[in-house]
Amino acid sequence: MARRDMFTSGLEMERSEQISRKEVMRESAERISQNKRIHEHEEHFKRMNEDSLMHAPEFVIKPRSHTVWEKQCVRLHCTVSGWPDPRVVWYKNNVAVDPLANPGKYKVESRYNVHSLEINRCDFDDTAQYRVSAMNSKGELSAFASVVVKSRFHRVPAPSCQLYFGTTLIQLKSVNTHIVDKFGVSFGREGETMSLGCTVVIYPALHRYQPEVQWYRDDVLLSPSKWHHMHWSGDRATLTFTHLNKEDEGLYTLRVTTKSGYETYSAYVFVRDADAEVEGAPGAPLDVRCLDANKDYIIVTWKQPAVDGGNSILGYFVDRCEIGTTHWIQCNDTPVKFARFPVTGLVEGRSYIFRVRAVNKSGMSHPSRVSEPVAAMDPADRARMRGTSAPWTGQIIVTEEEPAEGVVPGQPLELQVTEATKNYVVLSWKPPGEKGLEGVMYYVEKCVSGTDSWQRVNTEIPVKSPRFALFDLAEGKSYRFRVRCCNSAGVGEPSDPTEATTVGDKLDIPSAPGKVVPTRNTDTSVVVSWEASRDAKELIGYYIEGSIVGSQVWEPCNNKPVNATRFICHGLITGEKYVFRVRAVNAAGLSQFSQESEPVEVKAAIASPAPPYGITVLECVRDSMVLAWKQPTFIGGADITGYFVDYREIIDGVPGKWHEANIKAVSERAYRVSDLKENRKYQFQVRAANMAGVGIPSLPSDTFLCEEWTIAVPGPPHDLQIRDVRNDSLVLLWKPPVYQGRNPVNGYYVDIKEADAPEEAWRGVNNKATETTYIKIQNLKEGESYVFRVRAQNKAGVGKTSDVTEPVPALTKPGTKEIVVDVDDNGVISLNFECGDLIPDSKFVWSKNYEEITDPSRLTIETKGNKSKAVFNTPAEEDIGIYSCLVTHTDGASASYTLSEEELKRLLEISHDHKFPIIPLKSELAVELLEKGRVRFWLQAEKMSANGKVDYVFNDNVLSQGEKYKMNFDKNTGVIEMIMESLTPADEGTFTFQLQDGKATNQSSLVLIGEGTFIYISPHFIEYLSYEVTPECCVILKCKVGNMKKETSALWYKDGHQIKADEHLGFTEGITTKDSGVYEVVLKDDRGKDTSTLNLTNQSFKDLMNEVFSFIANSSTPLKITSTDEGIRLYTFVSYYNDLLQVTWHYKDSAIAFSDRIKSGVVGEQLWLQIKEPTEKDMGKYAIEFNDGKGGLRRSVELSGQGETHSKFLAAAIAERSRARVAGGLPDVVTIQEGKALNLTCNISGDPVPEVTWLKNDREITSDDHCILKFESGKFASFTITGVNTSDSGKYSILVKNKYGTESGDFTVSVFIPEDVGGKKK
């Protein structure tokens, strides 16, 4: 029985143990299954919310091997992923590549996880194995590629790639891409949608070929999400933002990758705050993230907004929402200023999203963009879920330890204060070290420093996470903290307490940034740089604000903090001046603003110009060459100030060192390089310079041989320019050739062909040579591109062609304006041009006949904004020509206008009508007799306004309404009449109606002469005879007459003698005393006559001459000094000289007494004073005084020894007098019979005595028995050949030289043989 009971109890115990074991296994299986579901759930969220997990480097694209030709460039590139970002190093045969040690040889770049090594001008030493190593804290990985450099004499096929389309294999050398139709800097607002797109040209064109297209923001690769979508349509890449937020602000980069390489394009996107619901409310916070997530605790961080609404932000509210619901719960009752907040009270295993709102005294901001979802769970579980799980086999293996039941947990470990602010304190610790404990939770206790009174903080519910945030602590007090573990078995011992912690912000607000420096960038942007905040901790970035000078209105330049100390502020107004300020931001808040920057004007920055190109030779002599080149395609935003030329010698194909040809910049695009060696080969390079500096040199030119040109025809024209491009015409300009040939250039031929046509398509534009250096080419085909070249000709023929121009399409650019001729109300004639594509540095350049106008005497240039006006000062025949206007720093904006003789005449007539507008009359003043002896005077005007008025004049007296005169003016019909009640002898005289309507005037007169009962109307003078002196010193006699008809004659008389029509009247060839006299004009016809007389004798003639002298004096030029062979000459020019003009020369305000040493005179229009052999006593002030009968006019000049003026002219006079000269005695040609003696003598002068050298055919000769050379007494040089022969024929020269100068005399010797002698010799 006992055994049965024992067996039964044992069986029951075994059965109970089996049941217990099954339950444990079932529970373990359920736990494993639950962990698997959690892992799958976490993997799902991991895919939805890609997290930056740390992993070792990985080569997405490895570098590939290359075989290249010698002197070519090669680039190895790869794409590397990894976190943290790997450090990439390139090796050549296991030796690190150092670009600084080999400048120009290697170029290493790293952008957007793409790393490249570029090797320039490969040679045989570059054949090697190259390794790229990527390393971060998680590991290191390498990839290899080989570069083989081949000689040109052993060609191998170029690298290729193979593409399969269906069953067809296509083998390609390379697939290239080019990004066009690019997006620019973009501006959006929160809540809006936006698309960025670029067209990608793939060549060769491949159907269904898709390159790898990637988008980056601030160098971080973007993935599709609910916020942005990527699309590729086969030729266009698009990035679309469904709902813009400030987090979307940044630098966006499109990268298109093929097997042959990649191409990128970047532009910035700015996102402004949405309009606040309450005026003055701040902008929304941004970049909300979740950190340190635990079972029931998460830290939420964010970034402060740039816009505070004009009032300081009081703090922030944090809201949470559980995934799967739409209910938002506010996490904090009072706003927190710190941009970090611990959220507690979460349910373990559930996921949440968070948002933040800012508040100031005006109201609440919009909520921020929500954070990514985050689960409340233990970090260890999260780490296990992130790890790689083994495949499910269906078999459950229990490896867990049995839970320790009834064991009280030990002390928490490593308790510390991780964060302390005035609002809260965060504690963290590690669980106790015992294994197998289940259901461990924690109690947190606090104690005021200096006491031992511990108080439990979470009395009701223990916390599950080893993190805890304590609120409601007294700011400024010090506390200590400790933690206890608890489970179902009880509460364990407390941990070691922390050090005393004072409640308050431990993180200080950063200090204000340092000096802010703005620099020009583009027409709408400025680069702002600043000094970083000193000793700033946990710095998030910087906000920049800009303000137009004087406005006091500050606008944010960025709405997302930037980490660098340099930022490009876009969207500015061109031409305005801005100031900038910067402040730093961290979690504690925003710093004070920096000091304001200096003002900067928004305009394009200036850069050094691109290199010139197209170097050609215009002329070559034995030791020099004239080069020409084309202007750089990019001038750097500023006018080019000059060019620098370098040259090097080429010996047996090997180039030597570069040498500077000019130290001072040359402004023209042509330069003579001197000191070269004849029959040597040279290469040249040119650099352009502007105010930003000197640009990089051009490519070396072709190799040119330095040998003298002896061809008879001219060299090539150069510097071809295109102007006034329209749909069917353009203007071509050029400069004459430097090498003229044997005869001067007398014309040019222009050739044209379509840009893509073969060489055989060249055809001439002009059949007859043009003498000008410009031509208008017409009858072009719209849209067709053309090229041009020019050839010069002289008597010997047509010379070399110029360089061909760049292709020019015949298209009128949108917005192109033409020159408009205008005559204003004052009669001023002007040419007007407008351009809408100006930049601040653009200038209007006016030209006449395509030469820039620099003399303001004929034209006055006025420019305002985008309009320029050329005003004619005194239009005349000398102004006839082609006027053009070019606008610099534009895409060739220009126009031209031809002012012909007929057009000038038309404009002058219009000008006169505008200056002196006339009221048109339908009928002149007429008279008729009415009944009862009344007389009616009347006329009719074509049109007069209501403001028009009439004056009735009789013999220069104004008549008024009364008993005798009745006036009437019908403004509707224009009839003006005056009724005179009776006619008496006192009414004999001139009646005039004077009309005025604004500026317009007119008058009509008639003369009444009574004889008995008849009335005669005769011609008469309205203005009597007078004279006028013109600026050209011409005297014009003039008068104004009225009541004329065809039969009326006008006879001129002088001193009673009639002046015939063929005699000169008007003194246009100069006035003399012979022109003194009494002049008379007689008007006469069948109605009567009138006479006007002008007395030009005695004092009247003197007054006339004084007026002429006044014009001459005012036309005189400033007094100048020059040196002559006799001494010093003072002179002035006048526009016209008259022999009656009286001038007086003064020295030190006293009239000069003339002598043999000091003389005065007149040559043409030049009045001069000659001082022979000047000395120090002649220093002082000289003046010439013109006598015009009034105050006179005096011109003066100072001949002083204080500076360089006197000594310079004195030295020049001495040099001119003392320089070496060949006075004479040498014939031009000497023809002499063979065997005769030749003797020539010439006079030599100069002090000191000159050196004498004789030359034959430009080579020096010396005296010998055959040719005797003598120089005697320092004055006489003789040349003697004792017996000439045919070898003595040639060109001979004598060269005399002293320190003041050199002079030569040439003669030719021709030796002939008499015919009889010649016959005998034969």
Image (cartoon, rainbow, N blue to C red):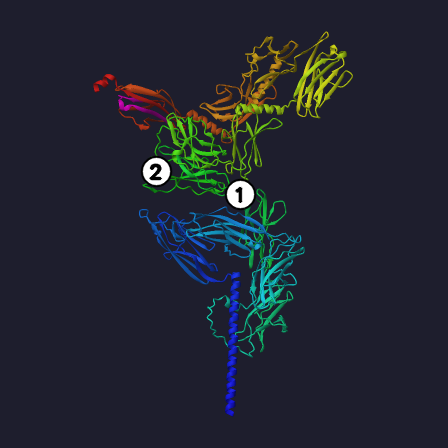
Q: Could you tell whether 1172 is left or right of 1053 in the image?
A: left
Q: Residues within 10 Å of mark 2 (few under 14, many from 20)?
A: many
Q: Could you tell whether 1262 is left or right of 299 in the image?
A: left
Q: Quadrant of residue 1320?
A: top left
Q: Quadrant of residue 1190?
A: top right
The amino acid on which the numbered mark 1 sits, given as a three-letter code, is Ala
890 or 1025: nearer the viewer: 890
Can residue 774 be spotted in the picture?
Answer: yes
Q: According to the image, label 2 marks what residue? A: 681
1000 or 1290: nearer the viewer: 1000
- Say what secondary structure mark 2 lies in: strand
372 or 128: nearer the viewer: 372
Asked whether 298 falls inside the magenta stretch, the response is no
The amino acid on which the numbered mark 2 sits, given as a three-letter code, is Lys
Q: According to the image, label 1 marks what residue? A: 604
Q: Could you tell whether 1171 is left or right of 444 in the image?
A: left
Highlighted range, magenta: 1279-1296
- Say what secondary structure mark 1 lies in: loop
Can residue 402 be spotted in the picture?
Answer: no
Question: Compared to 620, does 230 lie above or below?
Answer: below
Q: Among all residues in the image, which is located at the extreme right?
A: 963
x and y percentages locating residue 205 in the rendered image? 43, 47
Q: Earlier in the sequence, mark 2 or mark 1?
A: 1
Asked whether 1280 falls inside the magenta stretch, the response is yes
Q: Among all residues in the image, which is located at the extreme bottom?
A: 1
x and y percentages locating residue 648 in the rendered image? 37, 40
